[in-house]
Image: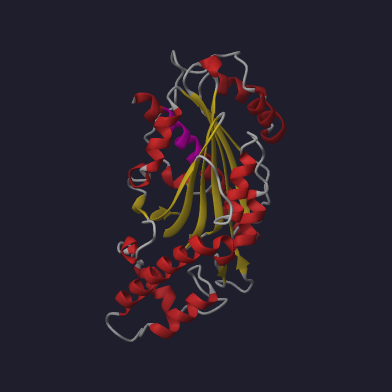
Amino acid sequence: MLAAAVIANPAAQSGAAHPGAAQPGAALPPALDAYLTNSVKLDAEARAQLLAGSPVTKLLESDPSKEVAVFGAVWVNAPIERYLAAVADIERFESGPSFRVTKKVSSPPRLEDFAKLSLTDDDVKDLKACRVSQCQVKLGESAIEQMRREIDWTKPDARDQANRLARQLAFEYVTEYLKGGNDTLAVYRDSDRPTFVAKEFETLINRLPTVSESVQSVRQYLLAFPRAALPESDSFIYWQDAEFGLKPTIRINHFVTARIPEGAIVASKMLYASHYFWTALEFRVLLRDAARGDGFWFVSENRSRSDGLTGFTGRVVRGKVRSGAEKGSQTQLQLTKRTLEAR
């Protein structure tokens, strides 16, 4: 998704071939080969790079008015469990200059989990003027009305009031999602037309291709949570305040890892974003390949939906977003490969 650009580290070096890298001319697992041929439509040059051990990315077909989709893959010469252990410590895994805060939410959630959530000066200013259908922060109608009703914007401590209410709303949002799933996700009223996050996510996730037969069970789990069960899986909620574009953005994600016969699936489902995004999904499939040893194919497909991509200005923004998303995905693959193999 677009969030991959946030993870980008310009200092990262390309993953070069070494004794543990994928060897040129070697065959790919049948399911991965079919996915690259039929869904990604990867050309011969990119396939050669992938087989030689270098990260490969490609922008995928998507609705240009509201969606960006990026494919990425690389061979990682390290155990799958090493990656799963790294992402389980999400506060360390998603840290660095671009991340102002990353916080794993307790189970069950506690209000204290959101103690570090803090609105920027611009967000506070925008919230003061926020109205239904005209708001610079993505919020549902009830949240907008609460901001207007419960905060005395004439007081010197108006910012503190706004932060307290924002933390309370985030806590309640997560609590309700854990009880009711997608039915409780926001209906954004920051513009004239309501945006139903649950509907956008359903349309987005149904576009995921089947790299493994197990993808369908994870897709169903994310759609039907908490009513659906997912064997051999772990999940948690986390929120973060990250630098992105022109504005720091507060995001809430549902993170899932599932062990499957071929390896593992890791998914990060965006439940909320204060700016830019309606929803997004980072979907990673880790596939063992006995012909190459103890490592795995790291295959990612990241999709995000957002506004502001139409019209003359939108076309300019869209071009920058697409190139930034692909560059971010490339860097993420390089960092994953280099970090796991170095250990």
Read off the magenta span.
327-337
Q: Residue at x 61, y 67 (%)?
A: 195
Magenta span: predominant SS is helix
Q: Residue at x 33, y 47 (%)?
A: 97
Vertical comparison of 285 with 22: above or below: below
List x then y, in percent, for residue 262: 56, 28
Queried whether the magenta region covers residue 333, the answer comes back as yes
Specify the quadrant that holds the C terminus.
top left
List x then y, in percent, for residue 213: 65, 35
Q: Dividing the picture into quarters, in which one does residue 187 lie? A: bottom right
List x then y, in percent, for residue 260: 55, 34
Residue 336 in sight in this render: yes
Residue lying furthest right: 38
Residue 289 horizontal side relative to residue 174, left or right: right
Residue 6 horizontal side relative to residue 131, left or right: left
Queried whether the magenta region covers residue 125, the answer comes back as no
Q: How is the image coloured?
A: secondary structure
